[in-house]
């Protein structure tokens, strides 16, 4: 009898001590394929604040070039046939969708044509059926790419992207306070600090994503990649983060950007998300999801608590078994990447999240779009172990079984 209780108490103590259960996938439902032919990439997913449906945009090569497609789902499992959004000779890439409190869709992406690479914005007031004329967020011969859009709690529309205006790959920011009618003059957020031995041309800041926490704080999470100073390691990909109280001013060097990963593994495409803390009503756990080759050399989508991400390897280059890293995709020797999360909460599943990602099932350069519903574990401020109801019940049953076997 005591053994079962001891095991359970130990688990709870472990959770309290290390945050081990925070932001960890406890119940992963089967992945759902959105596409099944040609090449499809760069999904973005968002939940409508009023009708509760999920809306997902991606680009397809089904028509020869790149075109944007939109699909929707009431439950994250059954998806509508995709509708085509663009008919252009340019290559549309990396769409990012947001929906404001009035239900207006805000969409950003970047186009590549013979002479230009620019960030484009459009909005829609009829659930993506018709769209405003294209608005150039950038309009020049610099390289501008991987935009990210986030509507904040005041309906301010924030857009980040990577641009080469200053000769380095840097993250830029603009925002609209009139629901996407006009945008402010872009501001350069990051500024490269070349490290000894690093090549300035590849010491870059890239793949920035904006998130406003439920506590009001704004975060920009991004990649820095540069030539590794360690021998034979090539480019080193790590995740960094900036924060802001107003969503406008993101101090870059004071304090220094917060480094979230550090190790021999490649970490890319970071996105922040939160799950409700079911033991502390009104509270949330801050999590990061990104693509990492910790389990699979070709990569998986992983998650970890933002405030306790530890290096995925120790100082000797060995995997640790105490790092609270969770694997959100399971396929070995095939790459899943570009994970994009959106809340999928319900009263029955308060810590449920949906992720959309691109998946190259045959490792043949042909990718398809998948979504997956995932229930996350959570630890309350009291430190007691808590998971989603199903996993909680399973843990209790396991403890009960151990008790029974002892008596
Ligand atoms: Ca096109
Ligand atoms: Ca440009
Ligand atoms: Ca994989």
Image (cartoon, grey):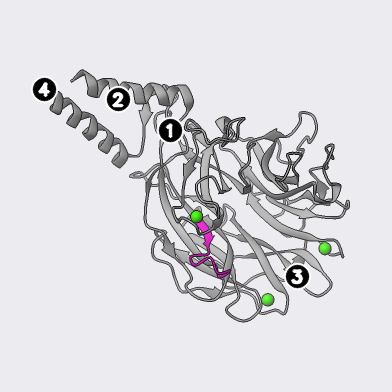
- Identify which residue, 292 or 136, lies in the foreground: 292
Q: Residue at x 54, y 58 (%)?
A: 335
According to the picture, the residue beneath numbered tag 4 turns out to be 407
Query: What is the secondary structure assignment of the residue under circle 2?
Result: helix
Q: Which residues are magenta?
A: 356-366
**Residue 242 appears left or right of 363:** right
Residue picked out by circle 1? 21
Q: Which residue, given by chain and number where applicable, does mark 3 sit on?
A: 112
Horizontal and vertical percent position of residue 207: 69, 51
Magenta stretch, main secondary structure class: loop
Distance between mark 2 and mark 3 Cα atoms: 55 Å
Circle 3 — which element?
A: strand
Instruction: Describe residue 68's horizontal placement relative to residue 248 as left or right.
Output: left
Residue located at (84% from left, 37% from top): 196
**Sequence-first disc among 2 and 4:** 2
Task: Kindly check if marks 2 and 1 are in contact, taking CB atoms under 8 A apart as contact.
Answer: no
Q: Which residue is mark 2?
A: 8
Query: Is-magenta flag for residue 47?
Result: no
Residue at the (79%, 29%) spot, across then down: 254
- Residue 302 image position (x, y, % from top left): 51, 46
């Amino acid at each position: 009898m005591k053994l079962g209780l001891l095991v359970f108490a130990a688990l709870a103590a472990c959770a309290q001590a290390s945050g081990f259960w925070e932001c960890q996938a406890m119940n992963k439902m089967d992945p759902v394929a959105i596409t099944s032919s040609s090449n499809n990439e760069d999904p973005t997913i968002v939940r409508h604040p009023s009708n509760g449906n999920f809306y997902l945009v991606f680009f397809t090569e089904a028509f020869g070039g790149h075109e944007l497609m939109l699909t929707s789902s009431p439950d994250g499992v059954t998806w509508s046939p995709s509708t085509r959004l663009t008919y252009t000779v340019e290559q549309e890439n990396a769409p990012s969708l947001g929906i404001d409190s009035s239900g207006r869709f805000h969409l950003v992406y970047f186009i590549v044509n013979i002479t230009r690479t620019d960030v484009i914005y459009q909005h829609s007031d009829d659930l993506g059926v018709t769209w405003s004329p294209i608005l150039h967020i950038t309009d020049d011969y610099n390289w501008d790419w991987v935009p990210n859009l986030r509507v904040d709690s005041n309906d301010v529309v924030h857009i980040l992207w990577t641009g080469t205006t200053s000769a380095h790959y840097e993250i830029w920011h603009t925002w609209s306070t009139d629901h996407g009618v006009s945008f402010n003059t872009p501001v350069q957020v990051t500024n490269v600090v070349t490290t000894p031995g690093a090549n300035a041309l590849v010491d870059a800041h890239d793949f920035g994503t904006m998130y406003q926490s439920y506590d009001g704080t704004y975060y920009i999470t991004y990649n820095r990649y540069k030539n590794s100073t360690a021998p034979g390691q090539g480019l080193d990909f790590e995740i960094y983060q900036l924060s802001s109280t107003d969503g406008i001013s993101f101090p870059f060097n004071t304090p220094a950007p917060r480094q979230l990963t550090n190790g021999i593994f490649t970490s890319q495409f970071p996105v922040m998300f939160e799950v409700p803390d079911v033991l502390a009503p009104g509270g949330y756990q801050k999590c990061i999801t990104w693509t990492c080759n910790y389990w699979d050399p070709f990569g998986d989508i992983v998650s970890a608590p933002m405030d306790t991400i530890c290096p995925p390897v120790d100082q000797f280059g060995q995997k640790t078994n105490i790092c609270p890293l969770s694997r959100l995709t399971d396929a070995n020797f095939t790459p899943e990447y570009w994970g994009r999360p959106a809340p999928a909460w319900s009263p029955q599943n308060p810590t449920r999240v949906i992720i959309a990602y691109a998946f190259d099932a045959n490792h043949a350069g042909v990718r398809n779009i998948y979504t997956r519903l995932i229930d996350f574990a959570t630890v309350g401020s009291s430190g007691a172990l808590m998971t989603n109801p199903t996993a909680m019940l399973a843990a209790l049953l396991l403890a009960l079984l151990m008790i029974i076997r002892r008596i």
